[in-house]
Image (tube, rainbow, N blue to C red):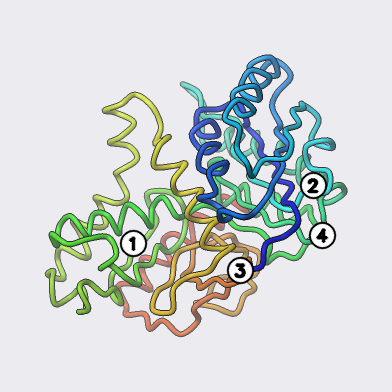
Amino acid sequence: MQNLEELKIAITGAAGNLASAFYPLLGSGQVFGSMQKFSLQLLELPDKLQELEGIKMQIQDCAFPLLNNVIVSSDPAIAFKDADVAIFLGAMPRKPGMERSDLLQMNREIFIQQGQILNDKAKTTVKVLVVANPSNTNCATLANQCTNIPQSNFTSLMQLDHNRCVSTLAREANTTIDQIKRVIIWGNHSLTQYPDMTHSIINGKQASETFSKDFLRNALIQQVQQRGGQILQLSRGASTISGAIAVKDHLRTWFLGTSQDNWTSFGVISDGNHYGIPKGICFSLPVTCKDFEFKVVGDVELDDFSKQRIQLSLVELQKEQQ
């Protein structure tokens, strides 16, 4: 993609660990390329502004040649003003004893408010990535408030699940990452997600030529679904390093494009025209990308097993997003 004069990048939850892991990737040109200038518009809660000021100083001290300016604020109207890219890392975390329904309602209120301000202050061309969980539902809530911004500009992060699937396949097949193609993650960023290897290519061959059906439909799916929980249990923290890389990969692919023989997985706002997903549901689908646009791969054949797994995740998302 041709470089823009400057990208104004708004980031919420900007004092968090995930944001701090992401800044060096962004500053070193690994996200939008080695020639793309940008400025940062960082948003945090009022009680975290002092910490964010310290992070701002660290970012400045990195002396990134691509970075023009850093603004910090607790006011979304300032952080979202004229934004070209908005990355939502901040949300209400689930606390001990909190029901999932309570978490969904609290985040719905946050993303309704932030969506209204984004709609009013950001550029109508802004590209949005929602990372904060529940990311699919938060993305749908945000998009519903933004009548000035095309629905196709909103995405949720499924790249972490996608990367986990690719890396697991590579380890199990004793091959390299670049030999794994056409993995799909369908549905929700939750335990109902469906890692689909039906059309995957490993070392130039169908995945079914390398692995048994039982492995692809059971063990592998469980490994990918449960990976985040295992990391949380072992390290007593979220997947910060791999999460930051996933944010980088999602945005870089969207901006610079997918390779000709591959696709990736984005949570997108369904237009109602693909795989029976109702309009308005934020659902992970296979996409190709070019010039900061994505296109749903609409001709993937689904067997009965895949249809059942997709339906399971759809039912969950319909309950969340109703």
Whole-angstrom CA distance, mark 4 to mark 1, is: 33 Å
Whole-angstrom CA distance, mark 3 to mark 1, is: 19 Å
Of the numbered discs in the image, which one, if any, rests on residue 21?
none
Q: Earlier in the sequence, mark 4 or mark 3?
A: 4
Point 82% across, 46% down: residue: 116
Which residue is under mark 3?
270
In contact (CB < 8 Å): disc 1 and disc 2: no
Task: Judge the density around disc 3: few (<14), some (14-19), many (≥20) Cα neighbours within 10 Å.
Answer: many
Image check: 233 left or right of 117? left
| Res 186 quadrant in image | bottom left
Q: Secondary structure at mark 3?
A: loop
- Front label number (1 vs 2): 2
Which residue is under mark 2?
118
Q: Earlier in the sequence, mark 1 or mark 2?
A: 2
Which residue is under mark 1?
195
Point 20% across, 65% down: residue: 216
- Front label number (2 vs 3): 2
Which residue is under mark 4?
124
Q: Earlier in the sequence, mark 2 or mark 4?
A: 2
What's the residue type where badge 1 is placed?
A: Pro
